[in-house]
Amino acid sequence: MKNDNVWRRLPLPDGDAPVVLIRRRRKSIGIKVQNGVVELIAAPEVSLIRLNQVLELRRDWIVGHLLRQRDQLAAGEDLSTARLQGEALTVKLAGGARKTAKREGSNLLVFGVQAGDAAALKAVAAKFLKREAAILFPARLIALAAACRRKPTGLQLSSARSRWGSCTSDGRIRLNWRLIQAPPAVIDYVIAHELAHLEHMNHSPAFWAETERLHPGWREARRWLKQHGGGLFVFD
């Protein structure tokens, strides 16, 4: 952290985070999140009103990064557990030469990885989770889209680090594969959120009404994602 004064503090579900304002000549406003600190970088002439507006506009993105960093710090290199649709699976090394993984009851068996090789374990677990996402997400999209007037034109998995989903103006939807670790209601919320964008490419009251129609429990699911979304980046 630079030796700049803390400008303000950003409220979080479990406390707050310092926001450091760095004045530097540049065309755009920059935001960095590192070591639990938000750095807001802007030219000297940018008003404090505008800076507060930017913070509010990017609030979900900032909070997601802060919570993810906190969860990763707390978890350290403890890779003994993985999650699939909200269910905890015990990670067990199972020998073998081919790097792959499969679920067996409440265990995730990981093959071809030596004890202590955290990078390889993460890669194999991530590949397994992506495969599961590629199976589940299309089925859930079809189920939820059945209630939509306008249908999506395609689905892709995303590896984005700052958003859970997106929807283009021509109806193509992208979903972050890491969501496969979240409870089913949370997965459905993100899908409903993107489907609502087929009718409203904004976050107006009409958009949230459409989200409510598609997934009435969206508020609780959104709250879960804000509080626990950072933990979905362990296997990355």
Image (cartoon, grey):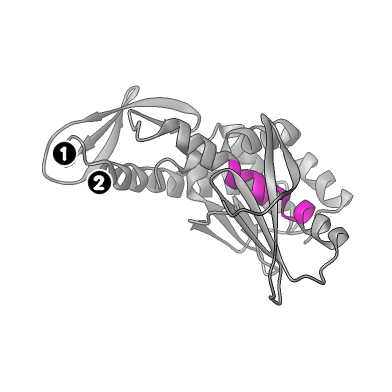
Dot 1: what SS? loop
- Say left or right for 162 vs 203: left
Residue drawn 84% across the image and 62% down it: 50
- Position in image of residue 193 (x %, y %): 70, 48
Range of residues picked out in magenta: 55-66
Q: CA distance from mark 2 to mark 1?
A: 8 Å
- Say left or right for 99 vs 39: left
Residue drawn 88% across the image and 49% down it: 205
Foreground residue among 114 and 86 = 114
Label 1 crowd bin: few (<14), some (14–19), many (20+), radius 10 Å: some
- Position in image of residue 105 (x %, y %): 32, 23
Residue furthest top as drawn: 106
Residue drawn 74% across the image and 57% down it: 197
Give the residue pinned by disc 2.
120
Magenta stretch holds residue 61: yes
* Image vertical order of residue 56 relative to residue 226, above or below: below
Q: Are marks 2 and 1 in contact (CB under 8 Å)?
A: yes
Tell me the tag on residue 77. Answer: none
The secondary structure that dominates the magenta segment is helix
* Image vertical order of residue 132 relative to residue 227, above or below: below
**Count of numbered tags:** 2
Residue drawn 43% across the image and 32% down it: 75
Residue furthest front as drawn: 3
Give the residue pinned by disc 1.
114
* Image vertical order of residue 106 relative to residue 40, above or below: above
Any part of residue 140 in sight: yes
The type of residue carrying mark 1 is Gln
- Position in image of residue 138 (x %, y %): 52, 50
- Say left or right for 93 vs 212: left
Label 2 crowd bin: few (<14), some (14–19), many (20+), radius 10 Å: some
